[in-house]
Image (cartoon, rainbow, N blue to C red):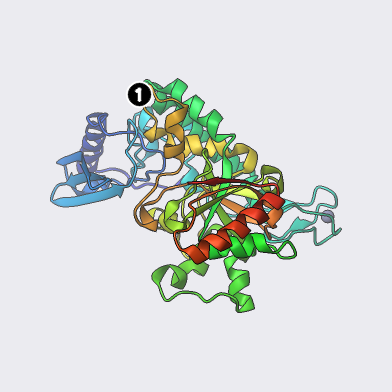
Amino acid sequence: MINRPLRSPVQRELDKSANDWLERIPSIQAGFPLPLQIPYSVGLRKSAHLQWRARRYILRITVKNIKLTKQFSQPLPSRVTIYPPIDDSRLPRRYLPQGGASSNMVTSQVILNCAECETEIPYAARSCVGCGLDAGFPNVRAADRVNEMEALRERVRYAQVAAKERGCADELEAFGTAASDSQAVMVRGFAALDGFVSNQQAAMISYYKMVRAGIRLPENNDYDANRDRIDGTINPFGVHEEIQYAALSLDGRGVKWYGDYAITLREKMISARASVFEENPFLFCDKHPIPPTGAVPPGYRATWPRRGELAMAKLHPRIRPGMTAADFPAILVEQGIRSADSDFIEVHIYGPIHPRAVERVIGPEPSKRADRVIWKRVKRNLEALGAMVDEE
Ligand SMILES: [Zn+2]
């Protein structure tokens, strides 16, 4: 415990008013990852309200003359969890994070040891540095840590409570069940799809591996300029260089912005080495500023078998009473008109992807005559791989 100086009568009054104020705002909603700091000591008059504008939810708080705003791209659920910089024990219980521990307070890396020889396993290692046995895939190991699972479970519990309050508990469960069966879908342009399925002696490798090999050039844009840093924040110690990306999908469709052809990957070819992550890392790092020596807060990634839980934790605000299975695909992948508007749960697949991993391709017949000839070849190659083709 931190030693606190004795409170003066004025401070006591401020504490009381902060409490009164907190008591009066049950109309603001309970957000899970919302470390909202209320500088209670600045003044006595406080107000808060929510606005909805341009797909952004804006929470405005006025403390005396100081205006604070916080933006959210998702609707806030039914109550705000407030972490005031005051003695927590004096606050009404419902304003404290459930279980007393906030997931965004835990940022340190959890160390794992080899089950066989107990040697500490470096974060990025594929095999034990002590005994050489397979240590599993680093991204899966990272998602399988106790603190990650507990934080995710806490989010799911919160999602269930919030959905119950809104009268759609069953719909949320149905969504979770559907998402537990979702598939990994990659999206590619025509030429990339052709190249991928034309040669069974080659596998698809990560963006970073292609750049290293000199077969791909980073583009002069803000995304490629920052890609290494952002991806490396989510999968540190160089693990990101091994990762290939897909999106969780319920209907074989991926994020259209990235290309015309949606490639569903066979579950058995990726499930052991795939983990799932909350959203596009660029969006995530925008919402959760991570200090230079910090780490991604736990609860935003999951192993492949637990992908349904991550979907529930993230997307519960979008579930409505009366929704059915037909509504779920558009909730899991929200199509945007620019890459930054699209929202999806990212699948992180460790290592190369062989053409045999393709289960299904959805895409249009090309409009140019020359491309239609190539399309025939692509379809033939896909059929030879045992993959389904859905032309549309
Ligand atoms: Zn070992």
Residue 177 placement (x, y as % from top left): 55, 29
Q: Left of 119 or right of it: where is 281?
A: left
Residue 389 placement (x, y as % from top left): 59, 47
Can I make out residue 62 in this image? yes
Give the secondary structure at mark 1.
loop
What residue appears at the point 34 percent right and 54 percent down from the top-left corner? 337
From what the image shows, is residue 203 above or below residue 272?
A: below
CB at mark 1 closer than 8 A to ligand 1? no
The answer to which of 346 and 257 lies nearer the viewer is 257
What crowding class fits label 1: few (fewer than 14 Cα within 10 Å), some (14-19), or many (20 or more)? some
What residue appears at the point 57 percent right and 38 percent down from the top-left corner? 182
Residue 334 placement (x, y as % from top left): 40, 44
Can I make out residue 141 in this image? no
The answer to which of 43 and 183 lies nearer the viewer is 183
Q: Left of 234 or right of it: where is 324?
A: left
Q: Identity of the amino acid at label 1?
A: Arg
Residue topped by disc 1: 166
The answer to which image quadrant residue 271 occupies is top right
The picture quadrant for ligand 1 comes to bottom right
What residue appears at the point 50 percent right and 51 percent down from the top-left corner? 363
The answer to which of 191 and 276 lies nearer the viewer is 191
